[in-house]
Amino acid sequence: MNDQIRISEIFGPTIQGEGPLIGRPTIFVRTAGCDFRCVWCDTLYAVLPKYRHEWHFMTANEIVERVDALAGHQPVLISLSGGNPAMQPLDSFIELARERGHSFALETQGSLHQPWFSELDWLIVSPKPPSSQMTAEWPAVEACMAAAGKHTRCALKIVVFDDADYAFARDAARRFPETPFYLQTGNPTVTAESEDADLPDLAARFRWLSEKVANDRWFGVHVLPQLHVLIWGNKRGV
Amino acid sequence: MNDQIRISEIFGPTIQGEGPLIGRPTIFVRTAGCDFRCVWCDTLYAVLPKYRHEWHFMTANEIVERVDALAGHQPVLISLSGGNPAMQPLDSFIELARERGHSFALETQGSLHQPWFSELDWLIVSPKPPSSQMTAEWPAVEACMAAAGKHTRCALKIVVFDDADYAFARDAARRFPETPFYLQTGNPTVTAESEDADLPDLAARFRWLSEKVANDRWFGVHVLPQLHVLIWGNKRGV
């Protein structure tokens, strides 16, 4: 219960802008620290050690208190993001927050698994495509799914910037034919340095991806943009 | 089987831009004719009698043939829209298309119900808010839900342009506490006459609605824009 959890930011309520819970009001708990360095990472402030002075060590209880205050002491969907939240000892936080009625979605690249994945409501695994310059390791992704067990709902989400990413996504969907599958348009203008989203570019990328999927008659998939750039541009939540 | 169905357009595959099936590849079957005249209707060509010369009477078999050709003879999600598709004799079409493996979502304002609502996979009822200058009749909406029965999944979707619409939506959510509930940003620039979507306006409306929901701590809802304006602007599908 006294494990220290490395936190980058806690903010909300806002609207989940991605994946299977798109549109859902949620509070984000963003952990700090990551085992990846995706070239287009939009949350470098939660990844790079040079931002370490901005991070907080918090106990499970402190995080729950903060979430409760933001949620007006109502049960809410908590989105656990990062960085890679699978690096943090989140089990006691999840247990404590669940006692208060909260529910949980965790998003991770699928490089690390934890036994407490089975305590989540949703596990969204987002293996990184070639444009990230990272390498997805499928056995590790499979281990994440296995750790989720039967109770936790799983989804796969692949960011697609280009044709190579799209081919990667097609392969990923073949590997996990039973798992709900989400394609998400990459958004190169979202960086820690720029604040305004390029909406025509976002629309063009969504159109491009939608047309590829339609032309391929790939019907067992979801195609979504990142809605949160509509809400807060590229500004940090809090 | 020889019932004539009034069709405005059949197009796709494209991406469903709204509601619980947002992001899903789908083929639209848009019926012609409507019992409502919403002031901000974006498909007047499927509503007003002056467009009648553009409409087609088609049999169930003719519609299935067209859908199959567009889908490359693969099973696909068919989105039944209008106009008000509840005005058409769609039962034999649904039966025939289901034999080919297709699935169905129907969107209607909830003014009319049909026994074949129970044959759908999804029924999305979209009662019209005050800004439409129409009046939602709750007993009729309830009759639609009842007609859906236990097999068909129901959702409510309310378009929100302004504070009065938002209050209407809050009331609707209280009337149907068990039904998945979607708020959708109104998009006044989408008309049959204009082709380009005003993306900054769309973003501002989505931000406004998201902030209202967050400020009210209304957590049991989904807030979504209309994604299809990103795909095809305001142009007609086909």
Image (tube, coloured by chain):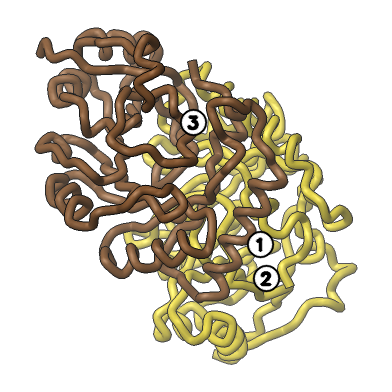
Chain colours: A yellow, B brown
Evaluate if marks 1 and 3 touch, with contact meaning CB atoms under 8 Å apart. Answer: no
- Amino acid type at circle 1 is Asn
Q: Is residue B126 above or below residue A116?
A: above
Q: Are marks 1 and 2 in contact (CB under 8 Å)?
A: yes
**Residue sitting at 42 percent across and 80 percent down?**
A98
Separation of disc 1 and disc 3 at Cα?
A: 30 Å
Q: What x and y, as percent, mark residue B56?
A: 31, 10
Q: Amino acid at mark 3?
A: Ile
* Residue drawn at (34%, 30%) of the image: B83
- Residue position for label 1: A84
Q: CA distance from mark 1 to mark 2?
A: 7 Å
Which chain is home to disc 1? A
User: Element under label 3?
Assistant: strand
Can I make out residue B194 in this image?
yes
Where does label 2 land, which residue? A31
Give percent across and percent down for residue B53: 37, 9
Horizontal side of A73 relative to B20 (left or right) equals right
Pointer 1: residues within 10 angstroms few (<14), some, or many (20+)? many
Q: Amino acid at mark 2?
A: Thr
Labels 3 and 2 touching (C-beta < 8 A) = no
- Foreground pick, B114 / B152: B114
In screen coordinates, is A59 left or right of B226? right
> What residue is drawn where x is 60% and y is 67%?
B211
Q: Position of residue B181 (x, y in %)?
A: 37, 58
* Residue A184 location, quadrant: top right
**Are discs 1 and 2 both within one chain?**
yes
Q: Which residue is mark 3?
A: B15
